[in-house]
Amino acid sequence: MAEIIDGKAISAQIKDECKEKVAKLKAEGKEVCLAVIQVGNDPASSVYVGNKKKACEYIGAKSLAYELKEETTNEELLELIDKLNNDDSVNGILVQLPLPKHLNEDEVLKRINPDKDVDGFHPVNVGRLSIGEKGFVSCTPAGIIQLLKRSNVDIEGKECVVIGRSNIVGKPMAILMLRENATVTICHSRTKDLKEVTKRADILIVAIGKPKMIDASYVKEGAVVIDVGIHRVDPNSKKLCGDVDYDSVEPIASKITPVPGGVGPMTIAMLMNNLVNSVE
Ligand code: NDP
């Protein structure tokens, strides 16, 4: 039986630490402020934006919500980002993705001042991460490092396999594990004999976007398994599952993240952490 890595409890710890830091900053006369931009009214995005506002409230930070209409042009959105870039009272700027199809996501994200890019998606921050400089790190992979460290998982010298090479999860995850001195392998859809590679992993991080694909036949006995995936079990149910087949893997793993309650809650906690760091 695996020990469960409790993302809910660890994310609550991190938010409480942020709350303390915000109170200290306030005592020094410094406000913490996040600007969140949403274009259109995609219901899932509205839920995410609402959760970010609530997290800001919890830690004592100010949040500015910009709810722009679906027809907003690229120029209008870029103008707003320029305005927020030049506003010294705004520490972090976040554009909720996905954007409506007519907008140029790439151009929009690159327009955010890298020193206010609390999502860590700007190429400057990705570059800083690669060469080991300080900068904002994408929240989900940064959260996974916290889950591992705060669950006393020893990373140095371990074989780590990351399945998935997306810009927001897989790639930054691999770089972070390398920074922690793991021996890292990245797998993707063209990897030959995936099982042969994943069975070498002491730490297996799964971010493939395929419900329950990774069962016990991919996992070494005693491995630590981190499941990044989030899916509805079926379209009409509220029940969630991950990319890992939890029931099959849990009996052989040494530690495992559940879905929900594992990686999911860490993303907003690390966003708050990035926001506080942007002021500190
Ligand atoms: P992407 O779809 O961008 O990337 C998926 C990656 O998995 C790709 O690199 C792809 O390879 C690889 N892949 C797909 N199929 C296979 C396969 N059969 N064998 C090996 N590799 C495969 O997804 P994301 O990285 O954005 O997200 C991954 C999962 O994590 C999703 O379920 C998403 O919902 C979830 N997620 C959860 C978050 C959280 O807060 N918990 C935050 C972000 C994401 P290739 O590059 O070759 O196509």
Image: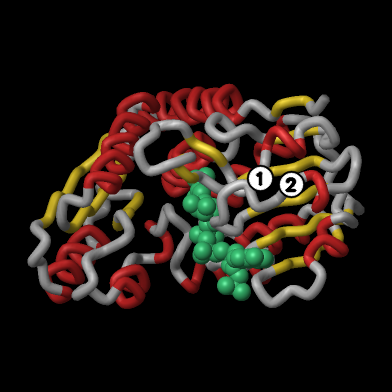
Amino acid carrying mark 1 in the image: Val
Q: Is residue 171 visible?
A: no
Quadrant hosting ligand 1: bottom right
Query: Residue 244 shows which numbered tag?
Result: 1
State the residue at coordinates (50%, 23%): 16
Q: Is mark 2 within 8 Å of ligand 1?
A: no
Answer with left or right where residue 205 lies relative to residue 231. right
State the residue at coordinates (43%, 41%): 234
> How far across and down, in percent of the image, does residue 133 sit?
63, 64
Residue in the foreground of this view, choosing between 182 and 127: 182
Answer with left or right where residue 219 lies relative to residue 86. right
Above-or-below relation of 47 to 130: above
Amino acid carrying mark 2 in the image: Asp
Q: Residues within 10 Å of mark 2 (few under 14, many from 20)?
A: some
> How far across and down, in percent of the image, does residue 277 sit?
49, 44
In which image quadrant can residue 81 be found?
bottom left
In which image quadrant can residue 145 be found?
top right
Answer with left or right where residue 167 lies relative to residue 222. left
Residue where numbered disc 2 is placed: 215
